[in-house]
Image (cartoon, helix red, strand yellow):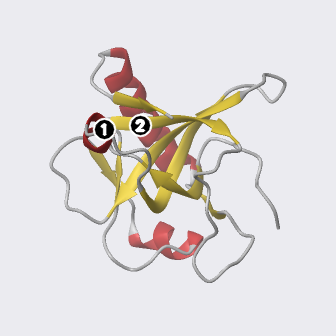
Amino acid sequence: MGLPEPRPGLVIRYDYLWTHEAAAGRPQGKDRPTCLVAATDALVRPRHVVLLPITHTPPSGDTIEIPAKVKQAIGLDDDASWVIVSEHNIDEWPNGGLSPVPGKPNTFSYGFIPPGLFAKIKASFLALARAKKSNPVRR
């Protein structure tokens, strides 16, 4: 299947590095689903993407819950999950942090967050980013 085109709303498997891990000097994180929230133009090299982590850990900050129907539609597990909008990774595309979806060799994406939910995620992320309350990790 190969690497997908990096489009907003795409959920990929990526070794997301939390801000506290980066501050401690860790070079990489744990493979997890992440929501691609933005990408530079395809003609720009290197191309960069902005990725938000998806976690099972109950929220303690700025998050958007992913409804069970959405999780089922894109192939995520049944446990409750949230998109964290208060921190993000900025990385080149493609990059070594991409990994295949478990049980699906050569498939690097789960699918897309529906437009209405993605609009909510993007608006929350942008509001925090403008207020300098979304912490980036540049990879």
Q: Earlier in the sequence, mark 1 or mark 2?
A: 1
Which quarter shows the N terminus?
A: bottom right
Viewer-proximal residue among 60 and 25? 25
In this rendering, the answer to whether 38 lies above or below 1 is: above
Mark 2 Cα-neighbour bin, 10 Å: few <14, some 14–19, many ≥20: many
Q: Is residue 63 left or right of residue 38?
A: left
Q: Amino acid at mark 1?
A: Thr
In the image, taking residue 73 as reference, residue 125 lies left or right, namely left
At 47% from the left edge and 62% from the top edge, which residue is drawn?
31
Mark 1 or 2, closer to the camera: 1
Q: Residue at x 39, y 60 (%)?
A: 66
> Residue at 51% of width from left, 49% of height from top?
35
Q: Which residue is the extreme one toward the left?
A: 60
Residue at x-position 71% and y-position 77%: 105
Q: Which mark is residue 19?
A: 1
Q: Residue 138 location, x and y as percent?
A: 47, 30
Q: Is residue 106 above or below residue 66?
A: below
Q: Which residue is mark 2?
A: 88
| The quarter of the displayed image where residue 81 is located | bottom left
The image shows residue 76 at horizontal and vertical percentages of: 49, 73
Q: Residue furthest top?
A: 131
- Residue projecting furthest to the bottom: 103
- Tell me if mark 1 has few (under 14), some (14-19) or many (20+) residues whose alpha carbon lies within 10 angstroms of its own: some
Count the numbered circles shown: 2
Q: Is residue 108 left or right of residue 90?
A: right
Residue 2 in picture, x, y percent from top left: 81, 62
Separation (CA) of disc 1 from disc 2:
8 Å
Q: Secondary structure at mark 1?
A: helix
Measured from the top left, where is residue 84 in percent x and y? 33, 46
In the displayed structure, would residue 101 be above or below residue 25?
below
Question: Front-most of 129 and 101?
Answer: 101
